[in-house]
Image (spheres, rainbow, N blue to C red):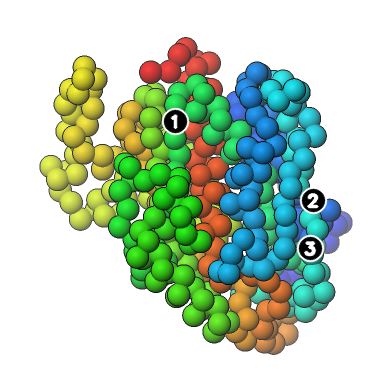
Amino acid sequence: MLTPYSPFQVRSTPSSSKTIMGSNFGHLFRISTFGESHGGGVGVVIDGCPPKIEISADEIQFELDRRRPGQSKITTPRNEADRCEILSGVFEGKTLGTPIAILVRNQDQRSQDYDEMAVKYRPSHADATYDAKYGIRNWQGGGRSSARETIGRVAAGAIAKKILREIAGVEIIAYVKRIKDLEGVIDSNTVTLEDVESNIVRCPDSDCAEQMVDLIEQVRNQGDSIGGVVECVARQVPRGLGEPVFDKLEADLAKAMMSLPATKGFEIGSGFAGTVMTGSEHNDEFHTENGEIRTVTNRSGGVQGGISNGENILIRVAFKPTATIRKEQRTVTNAGEEVTLAAKGRHDPCVLPRAVPMVEAMMALVLCDHLLRQRGQCGEVQ
């Protein structure tokens, strides 16, 4: 049984504030997200954004609309417009170089749906672990562990995307690759945003997308949920991004993706499939193309030795089935009593379609941060 935390209990104090600031991400391009699912609102503070970058609320809103609930028949029906308010850091449509604060207010909370969860722990959710760590939690809608926290990431990611495009011409596209055992056939070299947004499941393979939608609806009607894989490609990435040894580009990408709610796996390039190859089969041989050093294949996924090599960066992120489901399950209360729980509330039967802009945002935040670090240390990017 979990022992509630007492505020008078003596605990060691970390020597570095970084160890207790888990809501911060990045180095030069640094964000701090804030807010709970059923609180007044959620948002982000962005520090380190270069000045004179043209950005509008509409550009940020475009990304938030891709993430917001209630956008289709296969997402949660929670009705949130998720309208963003830029509170600081932007003047006359351009960034000032000062901290940018963005707020999205919560408007459609139904906290009464969570009354039972005040004492009952939802299986595979953060309820029990938050109680174990803090001795207190906001049980309404999951509080800080809710996916609504990602609003701040997606808003910041919209600005990071703009910086990457303007400085280096980088393009980032994510899409649903697989849901349960249905896998789309997608060419990461040519897929476009229009392809991704052509259907509600965000799988560019239209035939597979229809099957995915049918499967999600079937599972939702059973009170259950399913997971899958989001694939993401970053094209025209400059060479030289990434820092040895602990800030390797793929290491920071892995941390970024695994910090998203419901993630359970990360791959780059060949990923786990590379484990069944020989070295001669897996190595990316070099050649010269139009006077540039390129690789014939891209099993490295655009990163070698922790540093970008100029090829497309290709990653995959595994998302588990949504933890909160309507099917009755065994659980315990915070007092250790064995009970059952059939969750109420409005939840996604599959998080994959709404996870697409989240994955893009985290890719953009990592690449933008490393782009600025590279410029600061070595000058102009290649």
Measuring 14% from the left and 45% from the top, which residue is drawn there? 281
Q: Nearer the viewer, residue 55 or 46?
A: 55
The mark that comes first in sequence, 1 or 3, is 3
Left of 47 or right of it: where is 246? Answer: left
Give the crowd class for mark 2: few <14, some 14-19, many >=20 residues within 10 Å.
some
Q: Nearer the viewer, residue 72 or 225?
A: 72
Q: Which residue is mark 2?
A: 105
Measuring 19% from the left and 44% from the top, which residue is drawn there? 282
Left of 354 or right of it: where is 84? Answer: right
Q: How many marks?
A: 3
Inter-mark Cα distance, 2 to 1: 31 Å
Give the crowd class for mark 3: few <14, some 14-19, many >=20 residues within 10 Å.
few
Q: Which residue is mark 3?
A: 108
Question: What kind of element bears circle 2?
Answer: strand
Question: What kind of element bears circle 1?
Answer: loop
Q: Quadrant of the N terminus?
A: bottom right
**Which amino acid type corresponds to the residue marked 3 in the rendered image?**
Asp
Q: Position of residue 47 (x, y in %)?
A: 68, 28
Q: Quadrant of the C terminus?
A: top left
**Which amino acid type corresponds to the residue marked 1 in the rendered image?**
Val
Q: Which residue is mark 1?
A: 170
Q: Quadrant of residue 81?
A: bottom right
Residue 1 seen in the figure = no
Q: Position of residue 87 (x, y in %)?
A: 80, 34
**Which amino acid type corresponds to the residue marked 2 in the rendered image?**
Arg
Question: What kind of element bears circle 3?
Answer: loop
Measuring 40% from the left and 44% from the top, which residue is drawn there? 192
Q: Position of residue 216 (x, y in %)?
A: 49, 73
